[in-house]
Amino acid sequence: MKNEWNARTKMVHGGTQRSQWGEVSEAIFLTQGFVYESAEAAEARFIETGPDEYIYARYGNPTVAMFEKRIATLEGAEDAFGTASGMAAVSAALTSMLRAGDHVVAARALFGSCLYVLEEILTRFGVEVTFVDGTDQAQWAEAIREGTKAVFFETVANPTLDVIDIRAVAKLAHAVGATVIVDNVFATPVFSRAIEQGADVVVYSATKHIDGQGRTLGGVVLGSRQFIRKTLEPYMKHTGGSMSPFTAWVMLKGLETIDLRVRAQADSALAMAKALEGHPKLRRVIYPGLDSHPQAALVREQMGKGGTVVSLEIAGGQAEAFRFLNALEIVLISNNLGDAKSIITHPATTTHQRLSDEQRAALGITPGLVRFSLGIEDTDDLIADVMQALDAV
Ligand SMILES: *Cc1c(COP(=O)(O)O)cnc(C)c1O
C-alpha cells in the first residue's frame, strides 16, 4: 500500500493482505481465536503483540485489520479501530478518554443517540457537558475553557444539515489542549478532509455510506496511533464493542465502490435540491451544496460538495409531510441514510421523537421537516417521484 496513491486507488487496494493462496477478494477470517506454535509463543504474544499477530477477535482480527488500514490510509489518519456500530464508535471515542470531573463542549444539534451518550450517560459518571449552537463561533469561544478535555460535534448535523467549521473550532480547542472528536457521517469519507482540517479523532457510522447497501451495522474510530492503540484499544478490547470479521468484509467491499456511489448520490442530491428550490408546497429546501445554504462558502472550502442528504420542510406541517411520504413510489420510508436506495424519514416522529417540543424547535426540527437520503437510482426518476408526491400534498 502506497501513501501517494490517490483516494480511489486506496479505496480498492488499501490495506489488502493476501494469504498464501493469493486470493483476489479479501478473505473473511471467521475465527475468534488463533493457534500458537508453543506455550512459550502464547506467553510471548500476550506480553507483546507484534504486527500481524492476533490473540482473540475482540482484540483484533486480520479481516478487521484490513478494513482499519484501508480507511485509515484513505482518511489520512495514523490508525483506526473497527467497532460493532457507529454508536459503539462514538461512545468509545468519548468514554475511553474521559473521567469524572472532565469538561466536554458539544454542539447541540446531534443524532439522537449521540445526544443521549453526552447528556444522559457521561453526566452520570461525573463528566460536565456544555452544549452550544455549533454554527456560532462566539458560543464555542465562551464555552471552551482552560481544562476542557474534549469537544464533540457532527461536522454536518443530522437532520438540519448545519455545517460546523472544523478549523475554527479546532483552533479554540487546541489552544486549551482539548481533543477534537468529530462525527463525520454526513461528510462521508469521500468528501472529508477532517484530520487535515484539525480533527484529532474522526468517527464514522460505517452502517451508512461505507456499507452503502443497508446490510450491516458497523463503525470506526480514526486518530493518532497513540490515541487508537493506547487510549481506545484497551477500552474496546475489554468492553466488547469490536467489529466482527464478516462486517469488516462487507465494509471492505463497501469502500471499493464508495467513491462511485457517493459522488452519484451527491450529484442527484444537488439536482434534486435545485429542482425543488422555490416549489410552492415547500417552505424550505436545505442542502449544503446550494448557494442559499447559510454556510455555503464553508461547505465549498471544507467538503467541496454538499453530500448525499437533502432536508425539506413541507409547508403544511406534519399532516402534509405524512401525505408526501405516503405518496412516494420509489423513495422508501425508512431511517437509514447513505444507502443505494433512496430513503426518506420524518425526524420529529422517528429519530428525534424522544426530544421535547422545545428541544426540537430549538434545533429546527419542525413538524414539516423531512430528511431525504438520495440513493443511486436514476436522478430523473427520483425527481419525477418527488414531484408527483408533492402534487398529492
Ligand atoms: C447513524 C448515525 C450514528 C450511529 O450509527 P449506528 O451505526 O446506527 O450505531 C451516529 N452518528 C450519526 C451522525 C449517524 O447518522
Image (cartoon, rainbow, N blue to C red):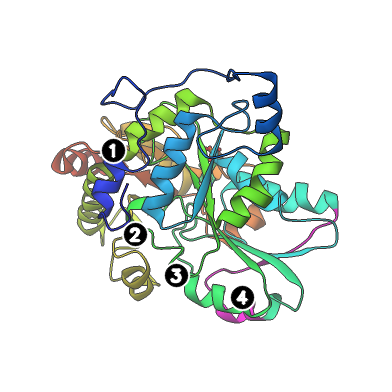
On screen, residue 354 above or below 253: below
Check disc 1 and report the residue beneath it: 256
Q: Residue 2 lies in magenta, yes or no? A: no
**Between residues 304 and 226, which one lies in front from this camera angle?**
226
**Between residues 345 and 101, which one lies in front from this camera angle?**
101
**Mark positioned earlier in the residue sequence (4 or 3):** 4
Marks 1/4: CA–CA distance: 34 Å
Q: Position of residue 257 (x, y in %)?
A: 26, 38
On residue 287, the disc is 2
Q: Is residue 343 left or right of residue 389?
A: right
The amino acid sitting under disc 2 is: Tyr
The quadrant in which residue 137 appears is bottom right
Is any atom of residue 312 visible in this view? no
**Mark positioned earlier in the residue sequence (1 or 4):** 4
* Boundaries of the magenta span: 126-141
Question: Measuring 44% from the left and 59% from the top, which residue is drawn there?
Answer: 161
The amino acid sitting under disc 1 is: Glu
Q: Secondary structure at mark 4?
A: helix
Is any atom of residue 271 visible in this view? yes
Check disc 3 and report the residue beneath it: 197
Residue labelled 4 has its Cβ within 8 Å of some atom of ligand 1: no
On screen, residue 34 above or below 83: above
Q: Position of residue 393 (x, y in %)?
A: 32, 42
**Mark positioned earlier in the residue sequence (2 or 1):** 1
The amino acid sitting under disc 4 is: His
**Mark positioned earlier in the residue sequence (2 or 3):** 3
Is the Cβ of the residue at disc 4 closer than 8 Å to that at disc 2? no
Q: Is residue 330 left or right of residue 158?
A: left
On screen, residue 68 above or below 64: below
Marks 2/3: CA–CA distance: 22 Å
Is the Cβ of the residue at disc 2 closer than 8 Å to that at disc 1? no
Question: Measuring 73% from the left and 35% from the top, which residue is drawn there?
Answer: 238
